[in-house]
Image (spheres, rainbow, N blue to C red):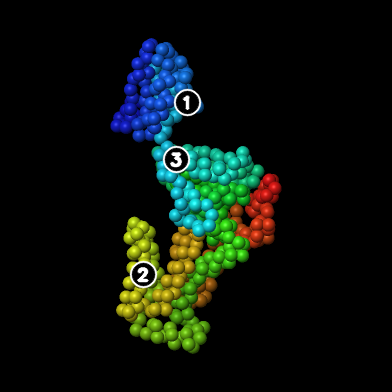
């Protein structure tokens, strides 16, 4: 207790009783003072001689009696009141009076959808659990809570539906989180980096989402969810590559529209990765692949350009990345201005100065635009990164280099696992049932079963 008194926000005072003094201690920055003055002080029995009698009439749902100094200290640091009799420090009563201060539930900012729910997770773990439980009011929804971090003591919750989620996945995640030996956990992204199967892979293995409706949906599919107190995003896993290109809005639209937009996303990702390397490879080694009319256009656009295609492409790609980073780090209104005005000014000036060709400028702009179609932000970052190895290989050995790079990427994806499950499921190994909701989404009448990779003893979605 003496160590706690060294903090300026620690308060301790004596309340006179008929048979002694009651010492009340707390951190005034952690508790709700209304609880102290409304629910504690007016109901103390001032004629009592023992601590138990003094707190007997408190309208508090649960009181903790303890004789352990470490328990007292730990509870004080998370928003409890400590009540002890002066001169009798062998026992304390701990009263929960924590102040729950967090921002209200608001609209999703990263995964906004025109159709569907408009609620997003916030930084309060209890609020996030409420948002999920009200969508899944079933007793099978289980919440396992852990404390992680020697300094931060961060609450981490693992959610799953008993009987649907694979228990092996739940056990694996809880063991990995429990074994973390770190000082602080500030955000859910810390957890995902520390417990994923392949820590050196640029491909994310947990989906980070701010939508409680998406978390509730995947829980019903047999997946598990990780929530971290202080993080406005939840993690869901095991995640497959296909799911990173699936948007929540896909399930709010007609299946034909949803399938079309999903295919557009897959095409956009391949276009974003391959179009600039193919341009460099063709202009460096493979002019014969181009039609005569197109060759004339490219020759005219590159006339007077002093740099080879690879250097020209790398400079433009790096400029796009600089504009993205500047727009992301600056305040919202200024960032939007930088992204739009900066792109127009720099692109126009570079073409007029004869430093880049207008054809490549269009290709790089379309490539950047295509990468924005990825619904999950982490996968978008991965796509931005892997374009550069493709570019270098295209410069060294042309189209063959692009093909070799694609093969290496495919081999890497085949080797990745997420909680021990193949990353490319249901494409490889092929799962016919799960293909109904992969590259395309079939009508809900065809999606009556849980995914094979997550099913246990309950397989029918609509009959459980």
Figure quadrant of residue 247: bottom right
On the image, the x and y values in percent for residue 18 come to: 37, 11
| Crowd around label 1: few <14 · some 14–19 · many ≥20 (10 Å) | some
Q: Nearer the viewer, residue 327 or 176?
A: 327
Whichever of callouts 2 and 3 sits on the residue coming sooner in the sequence is 3
Mark 2 lies on a secondary structure that is helix
The residue pinned by badge 1 equals 60
The residue nearer to you, when weighing 410 against 355, is 355
Q: CA distance from mark 2 to mark 3?
A: 42 Å
Q: Earlier in the sequence, mark 1 or mark 3?
A: 1
Q: Residue at x 59, y 44 (%)?
A: 136
Residue at the spot 51% in from the left edge and 83% down from the top edge: 289
Q: Is residue 318 left or right of residue 225?
A: left
Quarter the N terminus occupies: top left
Q: Quadrant of residue 55?
A: top left
Task: Look at the numbered disc 1 and give the secondary structure of its residue.
Answer: loop
Circle nearer the N terminus (2, 1): 1
Which is more foreground, mark 1 or mark 3?
1
Q: Which of the labelled discs sits on residue 343, or is there none?
A: 2
The image shows a total of numbered marks equal to: 3
| Closer to us: 362 or 180 | 362
CA gap, disc 2 to disc 1? Answer: 60 Å
The residue that mark 3 highlights is 154
Please determine whether, in this image, residue 331 is positioned above or below residue 154: below
What x and y, as percent, mark residue 48? 42, 13
Left or right, residue 203 beside residue 420: left
């Amino acid at each position: 207790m003496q160590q706690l008194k060294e903090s300026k926000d620690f308060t301790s005072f004596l309340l006179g009783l008929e048979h002694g003094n009651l010492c009340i201690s707390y951190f005034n920055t952690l508790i709700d003072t209304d609880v102290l003055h409304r629910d504690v002080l007016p109901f103390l029995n001032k004629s009592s001689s023992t601590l138990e009698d003094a707190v007997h009439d408190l309208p508090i749902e649960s009181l903790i009696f303890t004789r352990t100094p470490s328990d007292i200290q730990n509870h004080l640091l998370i928003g409890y009141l400590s009540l002890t009799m002066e001169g009798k420090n062998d026992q304390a009563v701990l009263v929960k009076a924590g102040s729950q201060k967090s921002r209200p539930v608001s609209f999703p900012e990263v995964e906004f959808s025109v159709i569907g729910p408009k609620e997003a997770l916030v930084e309060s773990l209890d609020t996030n659990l409420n948002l999920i439980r009200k969508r899944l009011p079933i007793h099978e929804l289980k919440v396992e809570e852990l404390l992680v971090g020697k300094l931060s003591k961060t609450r981490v919750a693992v959610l799953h539906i008993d009987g649907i989620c694979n228990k092996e996945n739940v056990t694996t995640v809880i063991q990995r989180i429990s074994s973390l030996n770190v000082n602080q956990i500030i955000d859910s992204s810390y957890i995902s980096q520390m417990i994923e199967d392949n820590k050196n892979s640029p491909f994310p293995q947990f989906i980070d989402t701010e939508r409680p409706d998406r978390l509730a949906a995947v829980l019903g599919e047999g997946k598990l969810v990780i929530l971290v107190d202080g993080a406005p995003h939840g993690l869901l896993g095991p995640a497959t590559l296909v799911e990173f290109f699936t948007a929540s809005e896909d399930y709010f639209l007609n299946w034909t529209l949803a399938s079309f937009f999903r295919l557009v996303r897959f095409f956009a990702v391949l276009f974003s990765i391959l179009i600039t390397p193919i341009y460099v490879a063709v202009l460096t080694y493979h002019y014969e692949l181009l039609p005569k009319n197109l060759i004339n256009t490219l020759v005219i656009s590159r006339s007077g350009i002093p740099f080879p295609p690879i250097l020209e492409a790398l400079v433009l790609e790096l400029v796009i990345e600089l504009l993205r980073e500047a727009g992301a780090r600056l305040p919202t209104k200024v960032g939007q201005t930088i992204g739009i005005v900066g792109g127009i000014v720099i692109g126009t000036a570079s073409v007029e100065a004869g430093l880049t060709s207008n054809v490549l400028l269009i290709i790089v702009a379309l490539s950047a635009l295509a990468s924005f179609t990825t619904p999950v932000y982490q996968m978008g970052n991965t796509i931005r990164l892997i374009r550069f190895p493709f570019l270098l290989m295209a410069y060294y050995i042309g189209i063959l280099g692009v093909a070799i790079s694609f093969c290496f990427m495919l081999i890497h994806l085949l080797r990745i696992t997420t909680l021990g499950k193949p990353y490319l499921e249901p494409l490889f190994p092929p799962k016919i049932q799960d293909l109904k909701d992969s590259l395309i989404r079939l009508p809900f009448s065809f999606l009556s079963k849980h995914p094979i990779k997550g099913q246990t003893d309950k397989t029918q979605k609509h009959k459980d």
